[in-house]
Amino acid sequence: MTVSPLPRHLIANMPTKLTRLLDWLLLNLDALVVGSLVALGLVGLMLILRYAGERIVRSDPTCLTWKAVIGRVLAKTGVLFMAAAALNIVVNYAQPPARIERLFDIFFTVAAALQGAVWGRELILGVIGQQVGEKPGETAIGNAIGVIRVLVSVALFGIALVVILDNLGVNVTGLIAGLGIGGIAIGLAAQGIFSDLFAALSILFDRPFRRGDTIRFDTTTGTVERIGLKTTRLRSLTGEQVIMANTKLLEREVRNLAAGDDRQETLRFGLVYQTAPDKLEGVATIVRAVVEAQPGCRLIRCVLTGFGASSLDHDLIFVHEGLDAEALFAKRQAIVIDLLRRFADEGIEFAYPTQTTFTAAPDGKLVMPYAIAADRNG
């Protein structure tokens, strides 16, 4: 499209700067129209994406899926960034004077840096929310979300500030060095706090256990009630609350009894040495019948493991389907009582710690050996 210049009598009555502006507008009218159309299309697309993100967030405010995380990011697209992006496109098409182009570039850089920080914060917090898998107010790590939000915001907006200053021509080398030294000093001063925080985050992402799981730590067995920034609280089987530091908890072996679909239990018992070999061979059969008489229980093995100080030692290992601890304890008790009854019927005796003393005469002969004493008493 060709545009004729303005008549000379009109140009003569206009200020010089205004004249130059009108000439530039007439010469770049095609580029301005194309750039404006492209900018409007881009803004429209961003508005549609933001609206879609807002709908996704309303349908799943807990951000438990990747779709919800992306929706959360899109919903935070700001109008300032849209305007800056639109103006930047128009300026790139129109190619205005260098100073004006530089001014719009700075505006776009500031808006893009801030918008990138907002997107990054929402993405990180959304991923954390997805890893948590529960509503922030109800999750075990929910009390840490506020601290995490502050740390992430400070880090991302700090990076955005450095990017903005660098594009403005400020030498940020000294600033970055100062921030690094200050960060090291703060880290050393708050080493214990950060150690506990990272331990809590390790529990969050690695998921060795969650609230409601029953875990065994050293000699303590209990149900996880709360995971805080510094400590984890358990409700033990005896009813009292056990409090353990997160850092210490992760340094040692933790058994999650809630993981899996069943529980494997071991019962150890000993029989007296006077048990006949044929009776010993029938122990496994008796034990299998006792265990499998309990619904949901399956025998893995029952074997003679060795010669103890005062007993013939056996290991009984069985599997209980399900994770209900109360049901497991009830069936374990039933198995023990039934074993006592069956062994009594078969004449098989459980051993207990015993010691037999033999007295010798001066000539070395035993005085009243066990067999003779037993005959006399009989």
Image: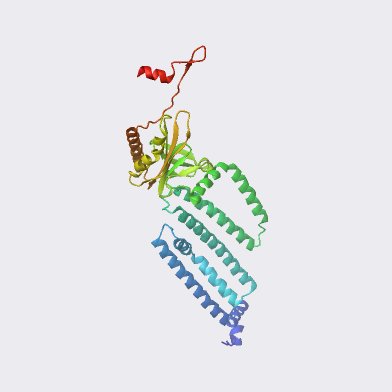
Where 117 falls versus 202 (above or below)? below
Rendering coords of residue 186 (x, y %): 59, 45
Q: Is 128 or 96 nearer to us in this picture?
A: 128
Q: Is 66 or 285 nearer to us in this picture?
A: 285
Where 52 falls versus 251 (above or below)? below
Q: Is residue 139 left or right of residue 25?
A: left
Rendering coords of residue 153 (x, y %): 53, 54
Quadrant housing the C terminus: top left
Rendering coords of residue 85 (x, y %): 54, 70
Q: Is 17 or 197 nearer to us in this picture?
A: 197
The coloring applied to the image is rainbow
Quadrant housing the N terminus: bottom right
Tell me what residue is drawn at x 61 percent, y 60 percent: 163
Q: Is residue 25 left or right of residue 324?
A: right
Tell me what residue is drawn at x 52 percent, y 66 percent: 81
Name the image quarter holding residue 377. Answer: top left
Q: Is residue 94 left or right of residue 298?
A: right
Where 3 falls versus 299 (above or below)? below
Q: Is residue 347 left or right of residue 6?
A: left
The answer to whether residue 57 is visible is yes
The answer to whether residue 223 is visible is no
